[in-house]
Image (cartoon, rainbow, N blue to C red):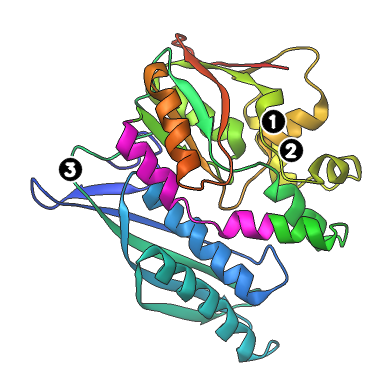
Amino acid sequence: MGIDTGDDAAVYRLTDQLALVQTVDYFTPIVDDPYDFGAIAAANSLSDVYAMGGRPLTALNIVGFPSRTLPLKILARILLGGAEKCREAGCTVVGGHTIDDEEPKFGLAVTGLIEPGKAITNAAARPGDVLVLTKPLGTGIVATAIKRELADVATVRVATRTMATLNAAASEAALAVGVNACTDVTGFGLLGHLAGMCRGSRVGAVLSAGAAPVLPGVFDLIRKGSVPGGTRRNLENVARRVRWARNVPEELRLLLADAQTSGGLLLSVPAGRAAALVRLLEERGVPVVARLGEIVEDPDARIRVEP
């Protein structure tokens, strides 16, 4: 597996029993606390391996830091947050590379393991599948609110905890039940990543906007104008593929397109296994288990969004 289907990570077979899963991701701070930033960035990077059904093995730090203007103790806290999140994942940080940069940046290049033939692609959804999401939406909106000093402490705390939560349990449940397709919801938003799944699988989808889980306080922040530019661009980019019911409000449209950081897994599971998946996700303590809609036949890969 590689770039042909826009999957979350590359899978390279070593033997008939063993394959590597490889990915890389990094970004600028989205929260004020350096430790939390490091943990979130690590969870986000590890998520691509989980989305493929893999197990993270090793990680390399990727760092940009303004050493002339910020104290190195801030960098130490970022690295500690990342290292402890990797430790939680059973993944060893084996090194990395740092450059001087005007703005802090942090992330990981992650290598994982998987058995060939068991990788979960984003391009195998089937008509009749149920769509399940495992984290609430709205992290992009909250991150923008933090920058504009509009987010209260409670909202930041919940969003931070959500972003720093690993997708390990959700990935394990998906493998145990046997889902058809999976992707993690990150920068392109729920609609963008669902559109990629539909294109790769040559199917369409029907989405219930009202079923989308949302972080507390997000709609109030939208009304205050706390909407990232990336979220608005996401909405524009899916315009040709999405058909909106007239009574889906603008707030929900922005939420479904919100550019996420370390979002949940979007799972496409056969209808007959959906109840078992939901039950197993709940048993494993996955933050949110939301049934959003279903996959339908549509060679043009369109998404219909209902209230």
Secondary element at tag 1: helix
Nearest to the eye among marks 3 and 2: give it: 3
The percent position of residue 84, horizontal first and vertical second, equals: 47, 74
Quadrant (top left, top right, bottom left, bottom right) of the C terminus: top right
Residue 200, compared with residue 171, is above or below; it is: above
Residue sitting at x 47%, y 21%: 130
Residue sitting at x 42%, y 52%: 168
Callout 3 touching callout 2 (CB < 8 Å): no
Examine the rendering and report whether any part of residue 240 can be seen. no
The percent position of residue 101, horizontal first and vertical second, equals: 60, 78
Secondary element at tag 3: loop
Amino acid marked by disc 1: Glu
The percent position of residue 37, horizontal first and vertical second, equals: 62, 68
Amino acid marked by disc 2: Arg
Q: Residues within 10 Å of mark 3 (few under 14, many from 20)?
A: some
First along the sequence among labels 3 and 2: 3
Quadrant (top left, top right, bottom left, bottom right) of the N terminus: top left
Secondary element at tag 2: helix
Residue 189, compared with residue 166, is above or below; it is: above
Horizontally, is 190 left or right of 300 in the view? right
Callout 1 touching callout 2 (CB < 8 Å): yes
Q: Which residue is mark 3?
A: 116
Horizontally, is 235 left or right of 15 in the view? right
Q: Residues within 10 Å of mark 1 (few under 14, many from 20)?
A: few
Residue 156 covered by magenta stretch: no
The numbered dot on residue 278 is: none
Q: Which residue is mark 2?
A: 232
Residue sitting at x 82%, y 23%: 249
Residue 88: quarter of image: bottom left
Q: Which residues are magenta?
A: 159-178
The numbered dot on residue 236 is: 1
